[in-house]
Image: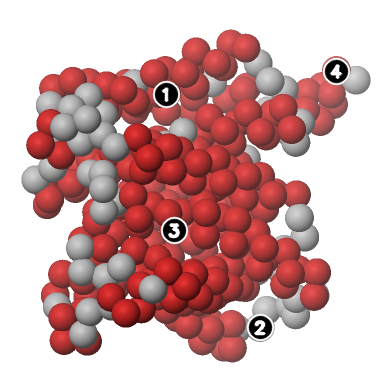
Amino acid sequence: MDIRRIAAYAAIYLLWGGAYVAIRLLVEVIPPFFAAGLRYGLAALFLVPALLLSAMPAMTRRQAWNGAWSGITLLVPGYSVVFWTEQRLPSWLVAVLMSTTFLWTYLGESLVLRSYRFQLRMMPLLLLGVAAMPLVAGGGGPDGRAISIVPAIATLLCAMCWSCGSLAVKTIDLPRSPVQTATIQLGVSGIVLLAFSWFLGEWRKVPSLARAAWLQPSLAMGFLVIGSSVLGFVAYHWLMAHEPASRVATSAYVNPLVAMFVGIVAMHERNSALQLAGAAAVLASIVLIWSVRFAWEPVWAVADRRR
């Protein structure tokens, strides 16, 4: 694996994993959908200079339109609701629920897109990680209480929407540059979320600039904009252009481990030996999936060898 792939995977593994704790810190001060819209809007603005200073091929209207609607699918129902659920669930638990993205993406890529042969012998490896989720979430919500079912279901639906968006990205005509794609998707999603936030009346609840500029929300927003959105999202689109969607979706398994570690150390969120055992099982499933390389073999490659 070359250095570009290592760096890109490190970005979506570590930066997106740490984003869950940053979101938790941010929504303690700023309303959730306003915070999500502001995050994506600022990230798009950060990418504009890169568009202006680099010689990128001009995009077509179709490419711009595809970038807009796929961005809305990925980021509005597919991730922004995480901001809302993190007001009600521990950050690492939200990350664990989002990890089901991997299963939906693999099933969609093999059964819907037919990019890979669906192999039953892969299911135990996939289900190992999913089966470990109850162990990771072993203690329920904060203070030992049972988790709230509504935000838990909402988070699972987010994971499905993100998977649908990821599969769409593999099939539609997008701008050739991942920076162009990321800018359109982040910018349009930011506008939609800010409008939705206004509709919900969140703008009346936005804190004063003095309070919003406190160290905690400022650092959290800076990490989400520059690290998670700009670097992470560009890395994601580069990987989607060069790697199978189901392999890129393994980030959904690593992110809970990163979120759990940072949440325990920085946020002092609850943890137990049962949860650590579940985390180890999740990591084991990733190692096994990556080791079974034949499972990622494209259908056309198999056909070529049979000729």
Does 292 appear above or below 250?
above
In this rendering, the label closer to the viewer, 3 or 4:
3
- Asked which secondary structure carries label 1, the reply is helix
In this rendering, the label closer to the viewer, 2 or 3:
3
| Residue type for callout 3 | Ser
The spot of residue 97 in percent (x, y) is 38, 36
- Asked which secondary structure carries label 2, the reply is loop
| Residue type for callout 2 | Ala
Q: Do the residues under discs 3 and 4 have CB atoms within 8 angstroms?
A: no
Numbered circle sitting on residue 67: none
Q: Is residue 271 left or right of residue 22?
A: left
Question: Which residue, given by chain and number where applicable, does mark 2 sit on?
Answer: 55
Numbered circle sitting on residue 306: 4
Question: Which residue, given by chain and number where applicable, does mark 1 sit on?
Answer: 130
Q: Disc 2 versus disc 4: distance between alpha carbons?
A: 43 Å
The spot of residue 41 in percent (x, y) is 46, 77
Q: Disc 2 versus disc 1: distance between alpha carbons?
A: 44 Å
Q: Disc 2 versus disc 3: distance between alpha carbons?
A: 32 Å
Q: Disc 1 versus disc 4: distance between alpha carbons?
A: 34 Å
User: Which of the two discs, 2 and 1, labels the residue nearer the N terminus?
Assistant: 2
Numbered circle sitting on residue 80: 3
Q: Which residue ends up furthest to the right in the rendered image? A: 307
Residue 303's quadrant in the figure? top right
| Residue type for callout 1 | Val
Q: Disc 3 versus disc 1: distance between alpha carbons?
A: 23 Å
Q: Do the residues under discs 2 and 4 have CB atoms within 8 angstroms?
A: no
- Asked which secondary structure carries label 3, the reply is helix
Question: In this view of the protein, can residue 14 be seen by the observer?
Answer: no
Q: Is residue 195 left or right of residue 61?
A: left
> For the point 85% across and 26% down, which residue is it?
304
